[in-house]
Image (spheres, grey):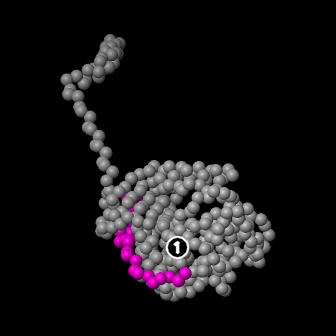
Amino acid sequence: MFRRTAKSIAFLVIVSMLSPFTLAQSGRGRTPTTPTPKPAPKPNTPTTTVLGIPDGGKLTKQDMDGLTSRFALRNGLTVLVREKHSSPLVAINIAVKAGSLSEPDDAVGIARLTHKAILFGTEKRNGVAIEKEVAKLGGVLTSRITEEQASLTLIAPAESYQAMVELLADVISHPAFKEDDLKKAADEVLLDSLRAQDNARQAVMDKLFATAFTTHRLKRGSAVSESYFATLTRQQVQAFYQSHYQPANTIVTVLGDVFTLTAIGQVQLQFGNYKAVSAPAAPAAQSAALAKPAPGSGQKMPSATVESATTDQPAINSTKSTMEEVAQDRLRYGNARADIGQSLVTVAYRTPAVKGDKEGLRDLATMQVLAAVL
């Protein structure tokens, strides 16, 4: 018994001593395997994501900047997509380069009226139907117009994304511009203008622009002419829309809980037929008396006695405004008195134009920091 146990122990010791050597030699005589080469990265070429895309919706360019994907469509539309999966929502913004600076002197207010009228109905949806559909999607639709752009923003649950894109494409591409809707839009624009004039801070900014600029369109401020709206025709509104609401002037931005390929595919499908249309010949617009509010328009600050004094300010309303501005060589100062119960002082500095590239964005960020410090 003892001898048998001793032999077993000795056998196990020998096996354990030989095991490393055996394992180390186990690969001898085998042909070494060549590692499978990694596939070469595919070139950054446009990809078809959905079927049935109109010709105008075909991709011509795509690239990435950090987490943001940028696409260019054949019809000229620019699309920005950024995934953000932290919440189950999607925000879609449509920005068109058709702000108040796009309004010529004899058509002040037409950009704001056009932007309002777009939400009053399309060829297949009236304004009420648009509101009901937004509510059905569980979303919120807002509109905004500034000096440089007019925009629509729709925020809704991510599951409604496809319907969101279809709705916005219809709103921006097929406005009906019915006569009754244009009258309602004109009333809203006039009311907004009155509110702006009654707002002390907005009135101060209007005064600042009127003092700072001599030829640039910014000198006109936020006022519109009631007499111009009284003679405005549907044909003029249609002509302005077709001249400015074009794919090359439009950027669609998608942000939220949606995958990039899904996002761009639906935009291609729904916005592929959004195209530039030659504007019809519009009758000559009547000149609007912008220097003074139209009779009965009530466009003045409440209980205000307005005075102005500048060191270098010619009669800014005597010449036709442009998008250019002469160089400023001295301080410009304006003063206005109104019964607002407080004093507001605004100081502005003229800066070089900001470019639309990365360098320009850095310059803009620098100026914003300087403004905050000041």
Residue 166 pos. (x, y %):
41, 72
In the figure, is residue 141 to the left or right of 65?
right
Left or right of 74 on screen, residue 89? right
Q: Is residue 104 on the magenta stretch?
A: no
Q: Nearer the viewer, residue 292 or 100?
A: 292
Say whether residue 326 is visible. yes
Give the residue at mark 1.
103
Q: Residues within 10 Å of mark 1 (few under 14, many from 20)?
A: some
Q: Which residues are magenta?
A: 260-287
Q: Quadrant of residue 315?
A: bottom right
Q: Is residue 272 magenta?
A: yes
User: How far across and down, in percent of the image, does residue 76 sit?
Assistant: 38, 64
Residue drawn at point x = 46 percent, y = 56 percent: 82
Tag 1's secondary structure?
loop
Q: Residue at x 51, y 87 (%)?
A: 180
Name the residue rendered at 23%, 31% in the picture. Answer: 33
Residue kind at label 1, given as amino acid type = Glu
Q: Is residue 124 left or right of residue 335?
A: left
**Side of 340 where 247 appears, left or right:** left
Residue 221 can be seen, yes or no: no
Asked if 347 appears above or below 160 in the picture, the reply is above
Quarter in which the N terminus is drawn: top left
Q: Is residue 19 above or below residue 47?
A: above
Q: Residue 100: x and y, percent?
A: 55, 71
In the foreground, 174 or 327: 327
Residue 240 in picture, x, y percent from top left: 46, 76
Outermost right residue: 341
Q: Residue at x 53, y 83 (%)?
A: 286
